[in-house]
Amino acid sequence: MIAYVNGILSEVTTGSVVVESGGIGYEILTYSDVIRRLPSLGSEVKIITYMEVKEDDIRLFGFLSSYEKTLFKQLISVNGVGPKGALSILDELGTDNLAAAIMSNDYKTISKANGIGPKTAQKVILELRDKISLEGSIFEGTSGDAQSEDSSSSISEAAEALCSLGYSNTAALKAIRKVEGAEEMTVEQLIVSALKFI
């Protein structure tokens, strides 16, 4: 299996890149957020890859972080979501918005992705909500200790309160995520602080 390709970025299209390494040009399928963060053509780049092997085809899918690759693999583990659908979801939402949508049961946002209907979006939430995390944020998977559970509970309660004020689940979680020290705040403090970011 090809874990990553390290080489010169030689071509970029809407949904793929070509990286030249060892005299070979590797075509790697990806999505818009990855393409936006790439260096200029001719620069050295390292693309973390997932290789799909079929009887009549071998394809590489590329990411700039292990977290993105993990999220992609979690998406394709959902029945009805193939690699193309997973890229479509990531293209529409990006990693953070997708994680927030899953954690807040916001299937309508996920179903905006091309080729993903409401039923498939609900499957994504059902199968991934216990696995998902927002890397480097207060939503990152907890170790299960009492403090983590308390902070997770406060975050959920604050998000529900913001939703009752008319904000979407995704918008509420994104706002809470921007609050510094959120895991140590009370529900009331979280709500007041999060409102500044909506």
Image (cartoon, rainbow, N blue to C red):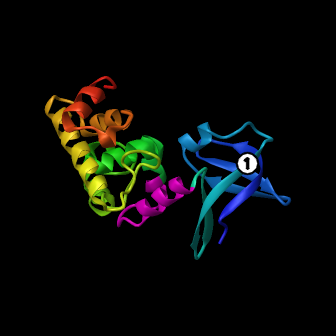
How crowded pointer 1 is (Cα within 10 Å; few <14, some 14-19, many 20+) is rated as some
- Using the image as rendered, state which of residue 86 and residue 13 is in the foreground: 86
Residue 61: where, in percent of width, then height? 59, 58
Residue 175: where, in percent of width, then height? 33, 32
Residue 84: where, in percent of width, then height? 48, 56
Quadrant hosting residue 100: top left
Q: Is residue 193 above or below residue 55?
A: above
Instruction: State the residue position of label 1.
Output: 45
Residue projecting furthest to the bottom: 55
Q: Secondary structure at mark 1?
A: strand
Q: Is residue 155 visible?
A: yes
* Quarter of the figure that contains the N terminus: bottom right
Q: Is residue 111 visible?
A: no
Any magenta on residue 56?
A: no
Magenta residue span: 66-86
Magenta stretch prevailing secondary structure: helix
Quadrant hosting residue 36: top right
